[in-house]
Image (cartoon, rainbow, N blue to C red):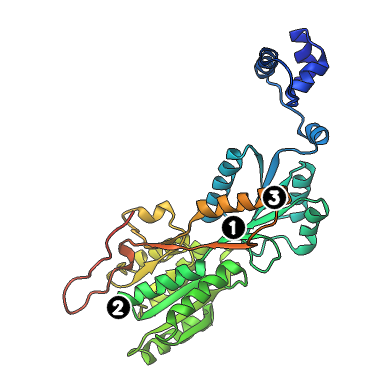
Amino acid sequence: MVSQKMIAEKLGMPVSTVANILNGTPHYKKETCERVLKVAEELGYQPNRASQAIKRGRSNLIGVVHFGSPYATAHAGIDFAVKTLGEHGYDHLVVDSHWHAGDADLVLSEVIQSRVEGVLLIANTEEAPGPVVMSRLKRAGIPIVSLFGENGSGLPLVGNSAQGGFFSMGRHLQHLGHRRLLLMVPSSENYSVLSRLQGFRDAMEGRGPCHVLTHEEFLEEWPRLRKENSERAFGVVVRMDMKRFDNDILRGNYELGRSLFGLGALPDAIMCTNDRGACGIFNAAYEMNIRIPVDMAVTGCDNENIGTFPMFRLTSIRFDIASAAHKAVEMLLKLLKKENLSHREVFFPADLVFRQSCGRMVGPEGPEVFVPTEG
């Protein structure tokens, strides 16, 4: 490992001069600083962050800590957060709980030992660390801002309005003429899932009844519900036990889709909790010779790139991930400066991306009519 002493010997300078320049001490001539930095780069010098943190009283390092799912929203949030931190002159340390087999104590130990100044916490599933574990960061005096996390956690929070997005999607499907709507969600009490469920319920308000069923209840009750509500709009939420599908939403929606399609009584539209889940429905529909959107509409959420592929052309809900990440970094930097936050919870609205998967059903007037493709 290259040391400051080695750089000093190569330049014929005192070690103290080299150390001061590398540690950012001002008042040295520009030419001297340039010589030191050039040789340090040539030799591959890497500063000791822990040592610098002790000397300066700060590390200039922010931890971006992810607990939970590998889905697109979290990963995009990390990317935007890291870029924003760089624009403000901060380095970053990204730690994923999966790298430590989900052990929250190991994750936080790595973060604390790295002497981070603050933490952006991305944790939107049951894998999120509990209050006892999180208290370690508070005892260490490390401020935290939650991105896409749970509201009511007591942490400053920045998120996107999944509830509003699923309400808008439900109403849009109704506007197209779809009356029998189905929403598939994991059986979970986390904010991400519950907000989707509530948005769907809101969309059914005043339009028709909304039933919330387990996987088994749904397969048993669906033919009867469809028959009894043949003349009116109605909605069904299926809360799936994801453990039976190894917590894989694609597999869960695929298997539930095959079981549903085998009953021979289709909904008008299926809303999926994310685009990956929607792909599971597409796979089941393909195997069962069901045409989307001619026989049934399908929608997703997160607006992943795969939704633009010709075989999907998936209508989806798009979150403003960039704005949310920028806001989370802004709030964290305010906390680092001991400034008060004007709002401790900030939510950005979602919008709809229309593609062909939500098209109308074929009616007596003629062939199916599609929503104009966007994206």
| Residue that mark 3 sits on | 119
Tell me whether the residue at label 1 lies in contact with that at label 3, contact meaning CB atoms closer than 8 angstroms. no
Q: Which residue is mark 1?
A: 69
Quick one: label 1 or label 3, which is nearer the N terminus? 1
Judge the density around disc 3: few (<14), some (14-19), many (≥20) Cα neighbours within 10 Å. Answer: many
**Mark 3 or mark 2, which is nearer the start of the sequence?**
3
Residue 335 in percent (x, y) is at 70, 52
The part of the image, by quadrant, that contains residue 87 is: top right
In front of the other: 65 or 227? 65
| Front disc: 2 or 1 | 2
Label disc, if present, on residue 101 of the rendered structure: none
The answer to whether residue 310 is left or right of residue 198 is left
Q: Nearer the viewer, residue 209 or 257?
A: 209
Q: In the rendered picture of this protein, how many numbered marks are placed on residues?
A: 3
Instruction: Give the answer, above or below, for where 230 lies relative to 191.
Output: below
Disc 3 residue type?
A: Val
Q: Answer whether residue 320 is visible to the viewer in this image.
A: yes
Contact? badges 2 and 3 (CB < 8 Å): no
In terms of secondary structure, where does tag 3 sit?
Answer: strand
| Disc 2 target residue | 177
Q: Nearer the viewer, mark 2 or mark 3?
A: 3
Q: Is residue 319 above or below residue 252?
A: above
Q: Position of residue 128 (x, y in %)?
A: 68, 61
Quarter-wise, where is residue 207 in the image? bottom left
Which amino acid is tagged 2? Gly
Q: Element under label 2?
A: loop
Q: Earlier in the sequence, mark 2 or mark 1?
A: 1
Q: Nearer the viewer, residue 111 or 357?
A: 111
Q: Quadrant of residue 268?
A: bottom left
Question: In this rendering, would 145 be left or right of 2?
Answer: left
Q: Residues within 10 Å of mark 2 (few under 14, many from 20)?
A: some
